[in-house]
Amino acid sequence: MKFTSILFACLTIFVAACSTNSQEQNSDEEQFKSIITPVSQSQSAVESEEANYNLQRKIIKEGEVAFQTSDIIATEKFIKETITKVNGYIGSENIREVSERKEHVITVKVPAKNFDTFLSAISSNAGEFDKKNITTKDVTEDFIDTEARIKAMQTVEARYFELLKQAKNIEEMLKVEAELTNVRQQIESAQGHINYLTDKTSFSSLTIIFYPPPVVLAELKVITFGEKFKHGLQNGWQIILSILIGLANIWPLLLIGSSIAFLLYFQQKKRKFVRI
């Protein structure tokens, strides 16, 4: 009977650790005050730790920038060299077709403390961003709350271990182990969330998109009748000049040909005169 009462007390502690709302304690729990007291002390320690967290906020910072570049290869080289300088790494890299142009996309992870320095370097190289979107999210409260729940559940877990040692039969052992398994799952889930927040706040993410400038096509100009007539006169004059230049180039032939034609004409006329 005593074992069952202690088990009930641990269940009550576990429910209180997972709930954010305060509940009134039943009068029957007074006899388990010695068990509940350590949990309260643990909670006080968490509240003290919360004050320390206020000095260092947990911030998730992410961003995306896009810009044009006339030299894709040089820009890519600069980005990768800068990543190394700020102790970052490339999360992903790909090339995609968007509106008949190739966009180079690099997702970079950099230490949170170096994010602004890295962004400033990219901005200096790009000159001007076509797109810039930087977001921040404060997860300090979520981080503290999750750690508090982990500490409270770990206290409950320790109580279940004590109950497991006091179990007198298989039935009691199975009841305690079932609750212990549930507590462990809650702790693992909360710890996974802590790890996720730690990773997100330790390294900031920046997606860099760069692409060549668009090709400007010359506009088709409509030519009017007056312009066509003017071009026609100019072309006709050019033809005349070309002919004159051509004749100037063959003037020796023209001279020789004219001389031969004159001699033939003169001889023919002389023959006619002799016959008469």
Image: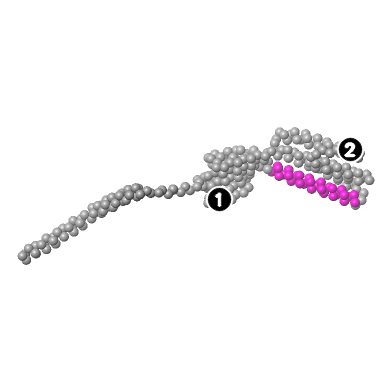
In the rendered image of this protein, does residue 180 appear above or below residue 51?
below
Image quadrant assignment for residue 195: top right
For residue 187: magenta?
A: yes
Query: Pointer 1: residues within 10 angstroms few (<14), some, or many (20+)?
Result: few
Residue type highlighted by circle 2: Lys
Q: Magenta span: helix, strand or loop, mainly?
A: helix
In the rendered image of this protein, does residue 37 appear above or below residue 230?
above
For residue 2, say whether it is visible. Answer: yes
Tell which of 129 and 169 is nearer to you.
129
Report, in whole angstroms, how far the alpha carbon at label 2 lies from the one at label 1: 67 Å
- Highlighted range, magenta: 171-199
Which disc is residue 98 wearing? 1
Residue type highlighted by circle 1: Val
Residue 154 picture location, percent across and down: 81, 43
254 lies left or right of 150: left
For the image, the number of numbered tags is 2
Q: Which residue lies at the image location 66% right of the left edge and 42% below the top edge?
A: 203
Quarter placement of the C terminus: bottom left
Residue 240 picture location, percent across and down: 26, 52
For residue 84, say whether it is visible. Answer: no
For the view shown, which residue lies furthest in the right direction? Answer: 1
Quarter placement of the N terminus: top right
Q: Which residue lies at the image location 14% right of the left edge and 59% below the top edge?
A: 262
Residue 75 picture location, percent across and down: 54, 45
Tell which of 165 and 259 is nearer to you.
259
Classify mark 1: helix, strand or loop: strand
Residue denoted by label 2? 33
User: Which of the two marks, 2 or 1, is nearer to us in this view?
Assistant: 1
